[in-house]
Image (spheres, grey):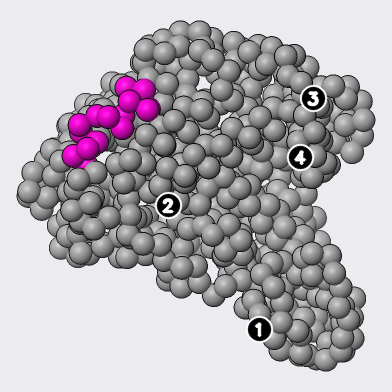
Amino acid sequence: MSDPIGALAAALGILPRYTDQMGGVRETSRDTALALIAALGVDAGTETQAADRLAALQAGEAARTLPRHIVTTPGRPTRLPADPGDWALLREDGSETEGRGPDLPALPLGLHVLRAGGQETTLLTAPPALPLPPRGWGMTAPLWGLAGPDRPGFGDYDDLRRTGVALAASGAGFLGINPIHAGFPTEAGWASPYSPSHRRRLNPLHIATGPGVAAGPLVDYAAEIPAKRAALRALYAGATDSPGFDLWVAMEGPDLTRFAAHQALSERHGPFWTDWPARLQDPTTAVAGVPPDEIRYHAWLQWMAHSQLTLAQMGLTAAGMRHGLYLDLAVGTHPAGAETWTDRESFAAGVSLGAPPDALGPEGQTWTLAPLNPLTLAAGHYRTLAQTIRQPLRYARLLRIDHILGFDRAFWVPPGLPGAYVRMPRDAMLAVVRIEAARAGATIVGEDLGNIPDGLQGALAEAGILGCRLMQFERDGAGRATPPEGYPALTLASFGTHDLPTMAGWADGGDIRARHGIGRIGAEVAARELAQRAREGQALAEAAGGADAGALHGVLARTGSTLVAVQAEDVLGVAEQTNLPGTIDDYPNWRRKLPVAGPALARDPRLHAVAAQMRDAGR
């Protein structure tokens, strides 16, 4: 074998090359391949080891009579591709059936395990496709910004409920916010909701406790977070025992206990478990040393967040919203956060998720997020993914999956090396999404933007998962703005996202001016980009019949997309965007409040005008 390392990498799903968005072909280097093989948990640092691991892998696959997973349809019998002999079928509810031969009984919706001949396979019993929701619209807004500039502190779960209830009267079917995963509350400056500590737990900093420290247009997290933590401690000290809380803790089980122990340890030893004393880096032994009342306190915070979010969703749907909350699932988790501490084997170690080079980022992007390991994901029967999707669907009937391109292939970046793609079990992962969405009666939106793999968008459409269409970027084959009827039905349309300029900022080149103002681009590049933006703005204005927000919202209303998301910043004429990618401290990312408090937004005549456009378009 001339290249056992390359052959092993390919067998493990590491792509030998890829085409970037500029059309260039990029080869996966030997060093990158070795780093990614190690990240997958395979020990193959030399050619001899690689040849041995490859031979063992091939022998194991040749000996299998069952595929690694099978996607089945609820209520329909399944015939296996080969006769496995005697088998045992463990259903998701814990019941077990034994049998013989290739024919399996009809199964209910869920994740089931078939065992035969010393082998296991996952039976993913999912509907073939999710139903398309009726045409509708809703609003997205920053949760922290719902407090408005006049109230000290930042938005909380009660603001979310009151804003959504008020918004429902306008005909909006959902209220969307950025991820509310558990973050790093001991790091007062930690603001990004897309770099979470644990995606299966909630952010307690948005529990309603009363006003914060300071009013103003920007949230001062360095002052607000310590004050919020003190308010939460005081709230807990005054709380009475609740049988409902104790029952909920029992139902959540040991996963909640481990998370609560992590939170308690982080208050003493710092936010990142990789910096803790060695004896505390293993949760199997560290949990026992955490005082029970500290575990109870952090479990209580999760209970409070759960309770307030549940009330928010109930309030929104009772007020008439079809979907209620529209939540966001981050693409990955911080490599030194609670999720990797409590469930280390599910994640690839020593690499980060990222994005390949493109015109705006010729060096590519590294996101400092731990990727799911496809080998352990499959070995664990996809339960980790199911639990991760299930968590936000406890509170929402509309869920956005950030960077769903990673369900097909994920871009892994080793330290100091170019990144490469790792193939993911797309069909199985999409089946898991359909299972969890069907359980919840939810609609799923996949962010299919960037370097899109061939066939992914077709697979999403077949699954009934909505894609995303951004008016800023939508062009036809001739480079003109896509007409409203050109937007596919199986999409959610919006003008932009949290990472892009608002309507006002886009028209004025605000994002370009901001990057120039902080020295990220030079004057010549800025002038060139501003000239290009002016041309794009003129073309869009001609297609929309105007350049103002009213004209652009009118186009959105008339698109063929099933759902439309209107950004609160666009309704209110805000020029500055929520996040300027590639910046941390030189731009106020994730800190800007809305000009008015969330509940008052529903009374704004500009919102009434947008709502009228949506009604006129049949939404």
User: Counting residues from the N terminus, which is met first, the one under dot 3 or under dot 2?
Assistant: 3
* Residue 492 can be seen, yes or no: yes
The CA distance from mark 4 to mark 1 is: 35 Å
Residue plotted at (20% across, 64% down):
485
Q: Secondary structure at mark 2?
A: loop
Horizontal and vertical percent position of residue 423:
59, 63
The CA distance from mark 4 to mark 3 is: 13 Å
Q: Which mark is residue 322?
A: 2
The CA distance from mark 2 to mark 1 is: 31 Å
| Residue that badge 3 annotates | 241
Q: Secondary structure at mark 4?
A: helix
User: Counting residues from the N terminus, which is met first, the one under dot 2 or under dot 4?
Assistant: 4
| Residue that badge 1 annotates | 76
Residue plotted at (15% across, 41% down):
550
Q: Amino acid at mark 4?
A: Trp
Residue 604 among those drawn in magenta: yes
Q: Amino acid at mark 2?
A: Arg
At label 1, counting other C-alpha atoms closer than 10 Å, the crowd grade (few under 14, some 14-19, many 20 or more) is few
Mark nearest the camera among 2 and 1 is 2
Q: Which residues are magenta?
A: 596-610
Mark nearest the camera among 3 and 1 is 3
At label 3, counting other C-alpha atoms closer than 10 Å, the crowd grade (few under 14, some 14-19, many 20 or more) is few
Horizontal and vertical percent position of residue 513:
24, 26
User: Counting residues from the N terminus, which is met first, the one under dot 4 or under dot 3?
Assistant: 3
Horizontal and vertical percent position of residue 69:
70, 73
Q: Which mark is residue 248?
A: 4
User: Counting residues from the N terminus, which is met first, the one under dot 4 or under dot 1?
Assistant: 1
Most prominent secondary structure in the magenta stretch?
Answer: helix
The CA distance from mark 2 to mark 4 is: 27 Å
Q: Which mark is residue 279?
A: none
